Image: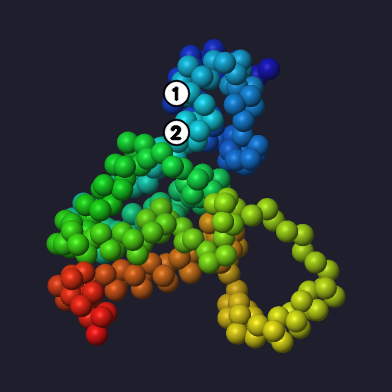
Amino acid sequence: MTQQAQRARRTPLSRDRVLDAAVALADEVGIEALSMRRLAHELGVVPMALYKHVANKEELLDGMVDALVSEIAPPVSGAGWKDAVRLRVLSARRALLRHPWARQVLETRTNKTPAVLGYMDSFIGMFLAGGFSVDLTHHVMHALGSRMWGFTQELFDDPAGGSPAPQPVPPPEAQAVMFKEMAERYPNILQVAMASAHDDDSVVGQGCDDQFEFEFALDLLLDGFEGLHTGNWSSRNGRHQAKR
């Protein structure tokens, strides 16, 4: 055993140390392989020792999300609302790219911890500080959805909220048959799907949510919010126009 490992085993266990180890382990082996037993082994303690700091696996995952939130930069002081929101969202996305497990865990959380609520509250505050009405801010937050956390929910994501398991790539002959059938039955889908290549290294999770696609959608939304804000939009007027 190395001296570093020996020192780590002698370090008193704490909640922060448990969460830091859980994040590092999930980064290394993936969230599916993370278990209380394996985490205890990494820390050099018996599994029961962990339960003094986290009540169960769900609380461990909540704590890991809190650790993720702590990596997101605070709002930039003195920036306009648009720059402040954009920079914060992209900071959240960088955190997700550092931790490939994070998107899946975020999508499965039902308990809003104080850290998560604090992030949401300060995120809303950027719009309110920019002069947005409470009414418009309410609808803005719905429109942003998961982009507040730095990712875009795909149209065909796994309905259970997790990332689908990677599927084996079929041989070229089978792919040719599949493309031919798609071209005949669903030509519009195939045309759009093949229109642009994606940077796999910048994708959060799986699918088409690479950096370019994410920023493209984010900037469209921010420009739209700006137009509504400067036009003094309200949901009352919006509903009236929709009925005409």
Kindly identify which residue carries mark 2: 63
Against 24, residue 101 (above or below) is below
- Disc 2 marks a residue whose amino acid type is Gly
Q: Position of residue 102 (x, y in %)?
A: 51, 46
Q: Quadrant of the C terminus?
A: bottom left
Residue at image point 33% right, 54% down: 88
* Residue sitting nearer the eye, 132 or 202: 132
Is residue 45 shown above or below 169? above
Say whether residue 243 is left or right of residue 157.
Answer: left
Residue indicated by mark 1 = 15
Q: Earlier in the sequence, mark 2 or mark 1?
A: 1
Question: Label 2: few (<14), some or many (≥20) within 10 Å?
Answer: many
Q: Residue at x 37, y 40 (%)?
A: 112
Rendered position, 46 above or below 29 = above
Q: Position of residue 34 (x, y in %)?
A: 61, 34
The quarter of the picture where residue 225 lies is: bottom left
The image quarter in which residue 222 lies:
bottom left
Picture residue at 19% right of the left edge, 62% below the top: 135
